[in-house]
Amino acid sequence: MGEKKILADNALNMNRRAFLGKSALGIGGAALGTLLGCNFYQKEGELLTKTDNPMGIKGILHSPHHAAKIKRVIYLFQSGGPSQFELFDYKPLLNQRRGEDLPESIRNGQRLTGMTSGQDSFPLVGSLYDFKQYGKNGTWISDLLPYTAKMADDICVINSMFTEAINHDPAVTFFQTGSQQPGRPSIGSWLSYGLGSENQNLPAFTVLLSRGSGRPNGQPLYTRLWGNGFLHSLHQGVQFRAAKDPVLYLNDPQGISKSTKRAILDNLAELNEKQYQEFGDEEIQSRIAQYEMAYRMQTSVPEVMNTEKEPDYIYKMYGADAKIPGTYAANCLLARRLAEQDVRFIQLYHMGWDQHANLPSAIEKQAKDVDQASAALVADLKQRGLLDDTLVIWGGEFGRTNYSQGILTDTNYGRDHHPRCFSMWLAGGGIKPGIVYGKTDDFGYNIVENPVHVHDFQATLLHLLGIDHERLTYKYQGRRFRLTDVEGHVVKDILA
């Protein structure tokens, strides 16, 4: 290309339209930096990649839509679908009519999974485990959950949850993202986008995984469940692993000092900023913010993950497994530590509840995994004054059938997926403690009082955080999306 051609092209790029276009990108970049809570520029005009904002990263909402009841959420997701009949929804009629076929008038032709739709009969089966009433309101809780039973006055049990999803992947995806189809942002990502973070050294959305002993090699979980979907990647969940390196690629390579790393990041941020000025891709700004968060996490993550200084009575509260990294008990203890650091959304996934066969022995092991630690988490938050502004959620993606999957014997049975009614519990700020909400029929097959849909649950969660679920939206491909899609209402009866 000749010299005259190069000069001519440069002249075209320096007209008034190009100047205004590039100026607009610069102004837009500064505005985005403000929204993300990142102070990218010093007063002298020099590039600054290290934020001076002690309050962390701001969300898109400058203020809540209404007064918030809570500041953070700890979601104890029980992946696989815990059986409500063995845990919270006491149905003595199922034991009285054990082995009888499920009446068609109760099933009413409702959809079954392919795993039981071909059965010749659907023998009713109640729990082999006893139930007792606890607390001031006489909440029915199974003998499998003795520690949970002791905190009956602190929790709200919902026995009337329901969903449309009948298989694991769409059901878990529905709870986590508000859609049965993959690709939408998860709850934690929506909260990061809307409210931001109150800690500049830790992500707003963290994830911890554990594998239960009920069915250890059961249903898998996918990283997209804590993904950011169409939101900026800054809002994706960060998984903390039970390993030497809790977060992958966080530590510096051997021979790289902190000062060298700081210089590398400063230069890299300058290059990224130039690229943003050229292309206007907002994801570039998210990338800069992520590099900075990773830099700060090099100090904050090892500190919060190290529980060695916890006193002995805390380990005794959470149980012996609390000293074993990667267990449910250890993750519950970490959840409390993250809550102390004002992490906005702390997601625990505990796998192993998908018990299609050998349910009595499997659920006994699974319940033992979670019972003591879940109750300890609530008690620990309470004694530290954190429960008042924290919401704790315990539950899975659906429930189990009132009939046996496969052969029913005196000591053994299984249960298939049942989306039409199941149980979960909530505790903490803004929730009425010590109540049972919703009711199912005597067979535990259909809801007869106060149904709560997945979108209702999500709308209520957002409401407690000061967010109107209809007003937190993101425009993508010409449509304004929200967590609750086009449904959902706040369940005001369970609010304190």
Image (spheres, helix red, strand yellow):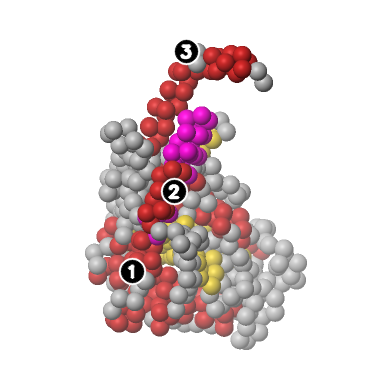
Can you tell which of label 2 and label 3 is closer to the viewer?
Answer: 2
Amino acid tagged 1: Val
At label 1, counting other C-alpha atoms closer than 10 Å, the crowd grade (few under 14, some 14-19, many 20 or more) is many
Q: Is residue 413 above or below residue 235?
A: below
Judge whether 436 appears above or below 230 on screen: below
Contact between marks 2 and 3 (CB within 8 A): the answer is no
Task: Indicate which disc residue 378 carries.
Answer: 1
Residue at disc 1, secondary structure: helix
Q: Which is nearer the N-term, disc 2 or disc 1?
A: 2
Residue 199 image offset from top left, x and y in percent: 32, 53
Going by the numbered disc 2, the residue's amino acid type is Ile
Marks 2 and 3, Cα distance to the nearest angstrom? Answer: 35 Å
x 59%, y 13%: residue:
8
Q: Is residue 434 visible?
A: no
Residue nearer the viewer, 295 or 9:
9
- Give the label, 2 or 1, closer to the camera: 2
Magenta range is: 269-298
Which residue occupies the extreme bottom position in the image? Answer: 410
The residue indicated by pointer 3 is 16
Q: Amino acid at mark 3?
A: Arg
Q: How far apart are the two marked residues, 2 and 1, measured between alpha carbons?
A: 43 Å
- Classify mark 3: residues with Cα within 10 Å, few (<14), some (14-19) or many (20+): few
**Image coords of residue 23 (percent x, y):** 43, 22
- Left or right of 341? Residue 452 is right
Residue visible at 54% across and 42% down in the picture: 230
